[in-house]
Amino acid sequence: MQTNKYMQMAIDEARYGIRGGYGGPFGAVVVKDGVVVGRGHNRVLGIHDPTAHGEVQAIRDAGARLGTHDLSGCDIYTTGEPCHMCLCACLWANIRRIHYGCTIKDNALIGFRDDHFNDLFAGREALADYLTEMDREACLQLFEEYRNMPHEGY
């Protein structure tokens, strides 16, 4: 099965980030009317900012490029199911839909604690129509690459 082209861009963005030592294997692209308007990868370690997740970076980039804080009509493609901070950032930005690769449980397999926060905030069932899993296998390959390379933990 072929990976969705936008998800592949998110994977490439994440791969750039992990190979540069910027942070975890999380990349994202924001798409509006078939055009990529924002890109980002996790930069938590690179700039010492715990909020510099891939989705947040892509939202910031899209807002700057479009000259607006309102990203209505945009979708985001991200390699990992968003943490609660990123999920709320997408909602605040009026992102229409989130497409993600690896799940919260997959994030735990590579040392991230998103499942803890998911439990703390009582799950995501109310957002089932907003979150769409896609291309999980391609994103799992990225996670495997990350797991097998030397990297700083956080």
Image (cartoon, rainbow, N blue to C red):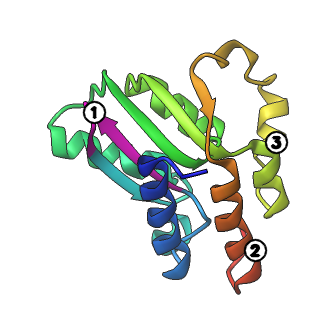
Eye-nearest disc, 3 or 1: 1
Residue closer to the observer: 8 or 72: 8
Mark 3 touches mark 1? (CB < 8 Å): no
Residue closer to the observer: 1 or 150: 1
Q: Find residue 85 and report its horizontal and vertical position in percent.
A: 58, 38
Q: Which mark is residue 32?
A: 1
Residue closer to the observer: 18 or 86: 18
Quick one: label 2 or label 1, which is nearer the N terminus? 1
Q: Amino acid at mark 2?
A: Arg
Q: Work out how far the residue at label 3 is from the one at label 1, CA to CA, in angstroms.
A: 30 Å
Q: Is residue 34 magenta?
A: yes
Secondary structure of residue under mark 1: strand
Which residue: 38% across, 49% down?
58
> What secondary structure do most residues of the magenta stretch adopt?
strand
Q: Find residue 27 and report its horizontal and vertical position in percent.
A: 50, 57
**Vertically, is 67 above or below 58?**
above
Secondary structure of residue under mark 3: helix
Which of the image's four quarters has the C terminus? bottom right
Q: Amino acid at mark 1?
A: Lys
List the residue tagged with mark 2: 147
Segment colored magenta:
27-36
Q: Would you identify the image quadrant in which residue 124 lies?
A: top right
CA neighbours of label 2 inside 10 A, class few (<14), some (14 to 19), many (20+): some
Q: Work out how far the residue at label 2 is from the one at label 3, CA to CA, in angstroms.
A: 18 Å
Q: Which mark is residue 137?
A: none
Which residue: 20% across, 45% down?
64
Eye-nearest disc, 2 or 1: 1
Q: Is residue 127 magenta?
A: no
List the residue tagged with mark 3: 115
Quick one: label 3 or label 1, which is nearer the N terminus? 1
